[in-house]
Structures are given as C-alpha cells and as structure tokens.
C-alpha cells in the first residue's frame, strides 16, 4: 500500500503548501501551517455543513434531563497513593498522561501498577518505545516482580500498536512514551508536534471506543512543562506530574487535570530498592527535626487536594550587597517580593538591604496563597534572630492592604495540626472556631485580622 502524501494546511485561511513554512504563503500568518494527509477532511476540503451532512448525516440530539447520569466505575491499581491522585483508580476508556523529569520513576511506578492490576485479574499491556523488552524485564526483576504476567510490546509504530491493542483488548495499556510513537501517515519525525498530536488522538479514540484505559508517558521540557503541543493535555482525561529531587528518595505525583476526580491532589512515594512505596504520613517528611526551636522556621498547614499537610517553611535573612537577592525554592518568587513589600509597609519590617532566601522543606511546591502568613513570620523570625515557640503553626493569605484573609477548610487544617501535637496557631480570624462550637483540644488559637496583629502575637509569645 503506497504511503499517502501529506499537505500543510493553514488554520487561518485554509491555504495549502506542499512543505512546512514558518509563514503561510496565502495569508501571511506565522506558525499556522498544520500537517495533514492529502485528501483527508480538513478545513481546506470541508468548509460547509451541507457537505458534512451529505457524507455523514445528522446526529440525533438529546436533552440533559433525558440522559442517564451514572457514577464512573473505578478499578484500584493496588497503589493507594496513586489511586488517591487518580480519584479512586483507573477508569475504563480513560486516558491518562503522566510526565516528569528523566529518571524520576515514571516507568517504575507504572510497571508496579500494571503488575498489581494483572495480579488482580486485569489484562495489562506495557508498550515500550524507549527500552527493549529485555530492559523492561530486568527492571521487573529489580522490583521483585519475578513472575509478572504483564504482556510487553516493544514497538513505536502507531498502526502496529493499535492493531495489537485491538486484537488483545487489555484492560489497561501503558505507552512509554508518546514522544517515541510515530504514524506512517505523516512524514515528520517521531516527537514532532504533528506526530505527537496525531498519535495521541488515535490512541484516545481507541480508548473511548474499546474501553481500554490508556496511560501515556510524556517527556518534559527544560522548564518542566510537558513536551509537545498543548492540545495533548486537552485531549486526555487526566494529567499527572511526577515531581521530586532525583537526589532525594521522596517523589510526589500531582494531578493537574482530572475529569474523574479532584485536581491538585498529590500522592507521596518513597523510592526504595524494591521500587516506589506509598507514604501514609507525608507530613513527617516535610518537617525537619530540630532539637530546639530555631529562628527562621515556621510550620505551615497547607492543603493539597483533599489532604491537609504540614510543611516546614524556612527563611534566611542575611546582609546583602548593593543588589540584594530574593530566592525562593518551592514558592513563587514574585509573591515573595510582594510579601516583603507588605511587611515593610504595614508591619514596619524592612529588608531592602538584606538577602532573603525562602525554602519549602522536602522539595514540595506550594502554590496556594495560604502560605503567605507563614512565609512572612519566618522572614521576621530570621531577621530578628528569635525562634518561634515550639509547636507553632500558621496559615493565611495576606493582601496588599495588610489584611489576613481566610484559607479554605481551615478547621481541617487545625485538626491535622492538633493531631500531630502542635499547640500554638496563628490563623485568620474567619478560620478560628466560632463561639459555641467545639474547640480543638490541645491547640491554642490566636485569630488575627491584619499582619500587624500577627506580629504583635509573635512578640508576646517570645
């Protein structure tokens, strides 16, 4: 069968070109030429609805009230932390994209998951495009999966992969990785924008029609974003990011998008000789063990999805040169600059000539604004050289006017802190227990409305 030729079609005007150009020769728009198989239905060939109707007919419509709503059935993977991120397990016909740095443990995690599903009676297929079958088998031996019955296919041609999937119909299929897969219908190299988009679209279509759950492994760029077109993340049902320092044994799996569960949920794993093991109490790994309280250290109760988690925020303020540095690890650097301005304007704490370094212990990334109050108290503690009391926690968003705004699900955060033995809390007034409600045993709560009040409370606690 002869290989079909491809054309490049402009997404703006519909003009065509036999080769890719940076600028459309018809309308002059930049970066709008998209590769298509010649003769396929696209914007240049089918522009009017009447043509589509003549070819395919008109579909029947139904109202929302007529449609039957049902909960999505999930199959647990056997890894509790992964199930937490997925929303309870894999979904038949669901497509999941997981990305992360090289060597972070993506293949290890997925091999453990498909082996657990295979042992539970779910037929699993592992498609490897970056390694040979022997290399995958060697990894399974290292993980202690000596008698694994997971089927392995070493292939990168899309048509052969889909033919195998259609013949075997596994419950779950892992494609490692989508950047190595190519289609004969396109002339571009594997990993190109057109190849990644088309291969992902065909695999997604197969998953929806067959009921096979498909997991795509994706490469990341130097900036940490998933490589390839942004539409790749829009096609799939779930997007997971594998985070962590390769020099540390702890890994985080974070859900960025999930049509079947909560977003921003995280799973915590520890890398061991036998693979990745779930961490049931992640707060323990994000808290440093100090024999005595030290200056510049504040414990924050953050919220990751449905899980309250305690993370230590450390700050170091030191004499700077003509151009003081502001560096943050695990926190937004621009927000740090804003908080320093609020500290100066509303609390009288000046750091203009000081180097300021802020770090979230354990390699965790905190994006929620509820970390503001803890960061500001840590900076003040380091600048004054006075540690905060033992068992001290804080959370709350700080506005430009100096007000301390409430954080979502504040009562759950306070209960988590009390459960782990913390005894003093500075929180927004709206998050403090209301009069007449049940108090949180063992926790003394100081409710504040402004950053100045929080500073006063800290001075009284010295």
Image (cartoon, rainbow, N blue to C red):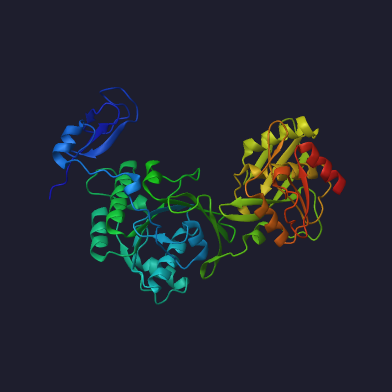
Q: Residue at x 23, y 54 (%)?
A: 159
Classify 212 as above or below 50: below
Residue 131 picture quarter:
bottom left
Q: Is residue 438 visible?
A: yes
Q: Residue at x 75, y 37 (%)?
A: 450
445 left or right, relative to 260: right
Residue 338 position within the rendered picture, expressed as x and y whole percent measured from the top left: 67, 33
Residue 199 position within the rendered picture, expressed as x and y whole percent measured from the top left: 30, 49
User: In terms of depth relative to the viewer, which is nearer, 57 or 119?
Assistant: 57
33 left or right, relative to 302: left
Classify 326 as above or below 119: above
Q: Is residue 350 visible?
A: no
User: In terms of depth relative to the viewer, which is nearer, 447 or 302?
Assistant: 447
Q: Residue at x 34, y 30 (%)?
A: 31
In the image as oriented, which residue stretches furthest toward the bottom?
A: 147
Residue 125 position within the rendered picture, expressed as x and y whole percent measured from the top left: 33, 65
213 left or right, relative to 257: left
């Amino acid at each position: 069968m002869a290989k079909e030729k491809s054309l490049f079609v402009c997404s703006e005007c519909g003009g065509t070109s036999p080769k890719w150009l940076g600028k459309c020769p018809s309308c002059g728009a930049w970066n709008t030429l998209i590769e298509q198989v010649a003769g396929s239905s696209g914007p240049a060939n089918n522009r009017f609805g009447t043509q589509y109707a003549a070819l395919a007919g008109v579909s029947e419509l139904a109202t929302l009230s007529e449609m039957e709503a049902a909960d999505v059935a999930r199959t647990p993977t056997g890894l509790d932390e992964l199930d937490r991120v997925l929303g309870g397990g894999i979904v038949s016909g669901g497509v999941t994209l997981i990305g992360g740095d090289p060597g972070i443990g993506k293949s290890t995690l997925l091999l453990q998951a498909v082996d657990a599903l295979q042992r539970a009676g779910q037929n699993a297929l592992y498609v490897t495009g970056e390694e040979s079958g022997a290399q995958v088998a060697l990894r399974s031996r290292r993980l202690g999966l000596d008698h694994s019955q997971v089927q392995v296919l070493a292939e990168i041609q899309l048509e052969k992969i889909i033919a195998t999937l259609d013949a075997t119909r596994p419950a779950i299929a892992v494609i490692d990785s989508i950047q190595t897969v190519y289609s004969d219908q396109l002339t571009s190299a594997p990993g190109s924008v057109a190849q990644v988009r088309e291969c992902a679209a065909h695999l997604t279509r197969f998953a929806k029609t067959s009921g096979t759950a498909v997991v795509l492994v994706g490469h990341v760029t130097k900036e940490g974003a998933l490589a390839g077109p942004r539409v790749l993340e829009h096609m799939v049902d779930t997007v997971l990011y594998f985070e962590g320092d390769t020099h540390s044994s702890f890994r985080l799996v974070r859900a960025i998008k999930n049509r079947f569960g909560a977003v921003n949920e995280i799973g915590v794993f520890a890398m061991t000789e036998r693979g990745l093991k779930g961490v049931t109490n992640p707060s323990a790994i994000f808290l440093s063990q100090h024999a005595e309280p030290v200056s510049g250290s504040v414990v924050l109760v953050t919220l990751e999805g449905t899980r309250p988690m305690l993370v230590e925020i450390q700050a170091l303020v030191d004499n700077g040169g003509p151009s003081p540095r502001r560096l943050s690890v695990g926190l937004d650097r621009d927000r740090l600059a804003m908080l320093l301005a609020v500290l100066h304007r509303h609390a009288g704490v000046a750091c203009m000539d000081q180097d300021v370094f802020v770090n979230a212990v354990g390699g965790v990334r905190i994006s929620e604004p509820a970390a503001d109050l803890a960061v500001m108290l840590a900076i003040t503690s380091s600048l004054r050289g006075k540690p905060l009391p033992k068992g001290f926690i804080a959370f709350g968003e700080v506005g430009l006017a100096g007000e301390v705004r409430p954080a979502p699900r504040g009562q759950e955060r306070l209960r988590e802190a009390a459960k782990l033995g913390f005894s003093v809390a500075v929180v927004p007034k709206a998050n403090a227990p209301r009069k007449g409600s049940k108090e949180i045993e063992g926790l003394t709560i100081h409710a504040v409305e402004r950053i100045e009040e929080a500073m006063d409370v800290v001075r009284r606690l010295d």
